[in-house]
Amino acid sequence: VAACTGVSVSTERAPNADFAARKTYAWVPNPQDGGKLDASIAGQRIHPEVDQALRAHGFMPASDQPPDMLVDYRVILQERTELTGGPGWGGIQTYNYTSGTFILMLENPKDGYVLWRGIAEGTVPSLAGATGEDSKIPMAVQEMFAKFAYKQKVIEEMALVAENIHDKFQLSLRLTQEGESSRKPAQQDALIE
């Protein structure tokens, strides 16, 4: 979104958003493009970055079945003018720039409610900088997903660890019970004598 200056990134998760049951996603088609996926230069930069981030969090593109969540985004560019200085030696000077905002949303496909949203804002030195080689879109997506705070793979690994601990506990318990039952006859024999 921004090329020269920094990008500020914030994220927000809906209070009832449950990502544990969600494993697949699909991109929202662009209604202005006849229902096709966004083929703009921005779309060509954004889609692979977001795909990579979602895969890193354990989500996969939906193939033949309906997706568990939809991915949508907006890029907003605004021309701005800032006045600096004041009366005196330098006078008032104007600075023209483009402000860019990139909004990424993960939505519930059943009702369209936003489950999670990331917003990146910054200054773009030119319209080409918004999506060109000097685009900060990759960095913005990485920062957004660094704050995502959900990893399907981590939860699955935690479940495997819990299952493994449970199995070892059960084995220990069984061996302890077998050991106690084998000691009882020896102790009973000692008491009889």
Image (cartoon, grey):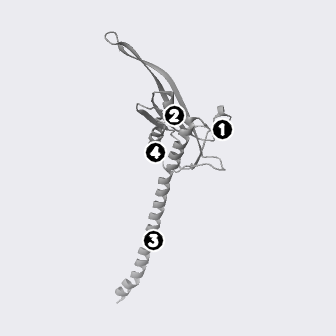
Q: Label 3 neighbourhood size at 10 Å, few (<14), some (14-19), many (20+)?
A: few
Amino acid bearing label 1: Lys
Q: Residue at x 45, y 23 (%)?
A: 97
Looking at the image, residue 183 lies above or below residue 123: below
Q: Can residue 159 be seen in this view?
A: yes
Q: Nearer the viewer, residue 126 or 159?
A: 126
What's the amino acid at mark 3? Leu
* Residue 36 image label: 1
**Which structural element holds mark 2?**
helix
Q: Where is residue 87 in the image (x, y as percent from the top left)?
A: 34, 9
- Residue tagged 3: 171
Mark 3 and mark 1: Cα distance apart in space: 56 Å
Q: Residues within 10 Å of mark 1 (few under 14, many from 20)?
A: few
What residue sits 65% from the left and 47% below the top?
66
Q: Looking at the image, tell me whether mark 1 or mark 2 is earlier in sequence order.
A: 1
Query: Can residue 102 be spotted in the picture?
Result: no
Instruction: Give the number of the disc on residue 7.
Output: none
- Badge 2 density bin: few <14, some 14–19, many ≥20, Cα 10 Å: many
- Are the residues tagged 3 and 1 within 8 Å (C-beta)? no
Which image quadrant for residue 93? top left
The nearer-to-camera label among 3 and 4 is: 4
Residue 14 on image: x %, y %: 51, 38
Q: What is the three-letter code of the residue carrying label 2?
A: Thr
The quadrant holding residue 26 is top right
Q: Mark 4 points at which residue?
A: 149
Question: Would you call the spot at circle 4 few (<14 residues within 10 Å), some (14-19), or many (20 or more)?
Answer: few
| Residue under the image location 50 percent in, 45 percent down | 53
Q: In which quarter of the image is the C terminus?
A: bottom left
Q: Which residue is situated farthest in the right direction here?
A: 34
Secondary element at tag 1: loop
In space, the residues marked 4 and 1 are separated at their CA atoms by 31 Å
Q: How far apart are marks 3 and 4 (CA)?
A: 35 Å
